[in-house]
Amino acid sequence: LSSRRKTPLNRALSSTLDLETVLDTIVTRANQLAGADGGWIYEYDEAAALFRLRANSYEDPHDVATLDPIRRATPIPWGQGVASRAASSRRAVHIPDIAVEGAYESPMRAALLEAGYRSILAVPLLVEGRVIGALGVSRKTPGEFSPEIVRLLSTFATPSALAIQNARLFREIAEKSRQLEVASRHKSEFLASMSHELRTPLNAMLGFNELILGQVYGEVPADLQEPLADIQTSGKHLLRLINNVLDLSKIEAGRMELALADYSVQDAVESVRTALRPLAADNGLEFVATVPADIPLAHGDGSRIVQCLMNLAGNALKFTRQGRVEIAVELRGDLLIYRVADTGIGIAPDKIDTLFDEFRQADATITSNFGGTGLGLSIARKFVELHKGRIWVDSELGRGSTFFIAIPLRVDGGATA
Amino acid sequence: MSGKTILYVEDNALNRKMIRHLLRGTTYRLIEASDGEAGVAMAREQRPDLILMDVQLPKVSGIEATRTLRGEPSTANTPIIAITSFALTGDEQRQGRWSVGLPRETLQSVHPVGDDSKTGP
C-alpha cells in the first residue's frame, strides 16, 4: 500500500460510521490493488448462521448489474462457499478454479461461472478471534493467487472487521437508546393517564366536601367544621402533588410545550398577589409587589411564569414566620428579572445546590412543619429553562432568601422541553 | 326570573350529582346529558337558558358540541360555560377553548346561588 492510497482509506474509516460507504471503499480498493475482477465483503450473522453481503465491486459494469442483485438476495449458509472456509480455518483460502467439480460448493457458483469467474481468494474478518465476516476477490482467470496478493488482502481484513464491529456497536447503542426512549414515553404516558385517573375521584371527594362545607346539605355542626376543612386542605394538597407530578413527567418526556404569547408582567404579578393574599394574611405577613409601570409587554408563556411565581412566593409565605414577602420585577436590557424575597428561615449554603432537584427540600423535617410537595422549585426551574432563562437563589440562614428568575423579555421560537 | 333551565353536559355521574345537589332548593330546573351528542340534541329540543359544558366528553367533545351549538340560530346566543373540574391542569383547560368562544374564566368550584336574579345574563 502506498501512502497515497492509504490516506483516503483511513480517512473514510475514521470519519464515518456509515458502514456501506466504508466497506464499498475497502472492497473497491482491494479489488483494484489485487488486480482482480470482482470483490466482496460478507458479514456473518451468528444467530442465523448466514453470511450476508455488505459490499461488492466489479471491474466490468455488466457484472455489477447481474451479480450485485444475486449476491444481495443470496445469503450463504455457514459451511458453504469460500467465505465460510476462510472463517472456519481463520486464514486466507483460495480456490484456483471453481469450474473444477467439487472445488467450490456455493449458491453463487452458477452465477459466477455464467459471468466468467474462475478463481477466488478469501480472508476471514475477525475481531478478538470472533468471526465477523469475510473479504474476497475473484478473477476471471483460473490459477492460484500470489503470496503478495494474499498479504495485500489480509491488510484489508482488520479495518473491514473493525468497521463492521463499530457499525454493530453503533446499531446496538442506537437500538438501546430507541428502547430507552420508548420506555420513557411509556412511563410518561402512564403517568399522564394515571394522574387523570387519580384526579377524577379526587374531584368528587373535594366537590362533595365543598358542598357540605357550603351548607348545601344543611347546617354543618360546629365541631365538624374543622375536620371538614382539613379534608379540603389535604385533598387540595394531594391534587397539587398529582398535578406537579404530571407537569414534571410531561417536561421530562419532552412533551411540555410553552404557549408563547404576549403577556402583561403587571397582570402576571398581580394575579399571584391576589391568589396568595389570603395565605399572607393568615400568616400575618406583609406581602407586596413592585412592578415598574413602564415594563413593556413580555413574550413567553404567561401562565407558566405565573405558576413559577406562585411556587416561589408560595414557598416564601410558607417559610416565613414574620416579616415580609416581596415580588419585584426589573428590566435589565433584554433581560426580565423577577425577584421573590422573604425574611424567612433561609437556606443553609450546603443545601442550595440540590434545592432545585425533584423532591428535595432543604430539610426533610420541613415537609412536616411547612408542607409542600418538594416539586415546586424543580418545576419552576424547568419552566424557566424552557424560557431559555435561569433561576437562582441568594440566601442566608435565619435572615431570609431571595429567588431570582431571569428570562429574555421576548422568548422566541417554539421551545419544547 | 324563576324557573330557568340549565343544561349540564357531563359524563361523570358523580359530577352530575354534585351540580344536582348544588342546585337543589333553588328555582333552577336542571336537565342533564352524559355525552356531547345527547347534549347538543337536548339543547336543540329544550332551549335551555344556560349550558354548563364539560370539556372532555364521549362521542362529541365539549369543544365540538359548543362549536355546533354556536353555529345554529336557535342556540347561537345561549350562554355556554365550560366546566372544568378541580382536577384539570392549566394545559387541559387551555386546549382549544378560546377558539370556540368559551369564556376565559372557568368554573373551578361552584357555589350555590340562592337568589337567581344575581346570575341573570
Image: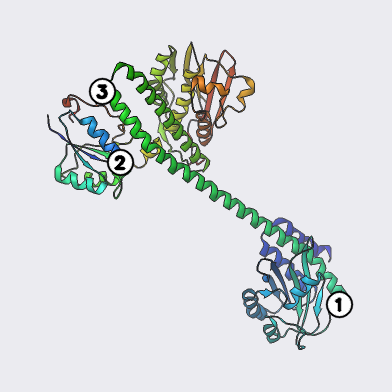
Residue furthest to the right in view is: A147
At x 25%, y 33%, the residue is B19
Does residue A31 sit above or below A160 in this rendering?
below
**Frontmost residue, A69 versus A358:** A358
The chain ID associated with circle 2 is: B
> Which marked residue is nearer to the observer: mark 1 or mark 3?
3
Mark 3 falls on what kind of element?
Answer: loop
In the rendered image, residue B18, in percent from the top left (x then y), is placed at 27, 33
The answer, for residue A264, to whether it is visible in the render is: no
In the rendered image, residue A227, in percent from the top left (x then y), is placed at 37, 21
Task: Please tell me in which quadrant of the rendered image residue A19 appears.
Answer: bottom right
Residue B80's disc number: none
Task: Please tell me in which quadrant of the rendered image residue A348 appears.
Answer: top right
> Badge 1: few (under 14), some or many (20 or more) residues near its Cα, within 10 Å?
few
Q: Which residue is mark 1?
A: A146
Q: How many marks?
A: 3
At x 55%, y 18%, the residue is A401
Identify which amino acid the numbered label 1 is placed on: Ser
**Frontmost residue, A141 versus A251:** A251
Are discs 1 and 2 located on one and the same chain?
A: no
> Badge 2: few (under 14), some or many (20 or more) residues near its Cα, within 10 Å?
some
The answer, for residue B106, to whether it is visible in the render is: yes
Which badge, 1 or 3, comes first in the chain's sequence?
A: 1
Q: Gap in Å between the C-alphas at discs 1 and 3?
A: 103 Å
Identify which amino acid the numbered label 2 is placed on: Asn
Q: Which residue is mark 3?
A: A215
Residue B12's disc number: 2
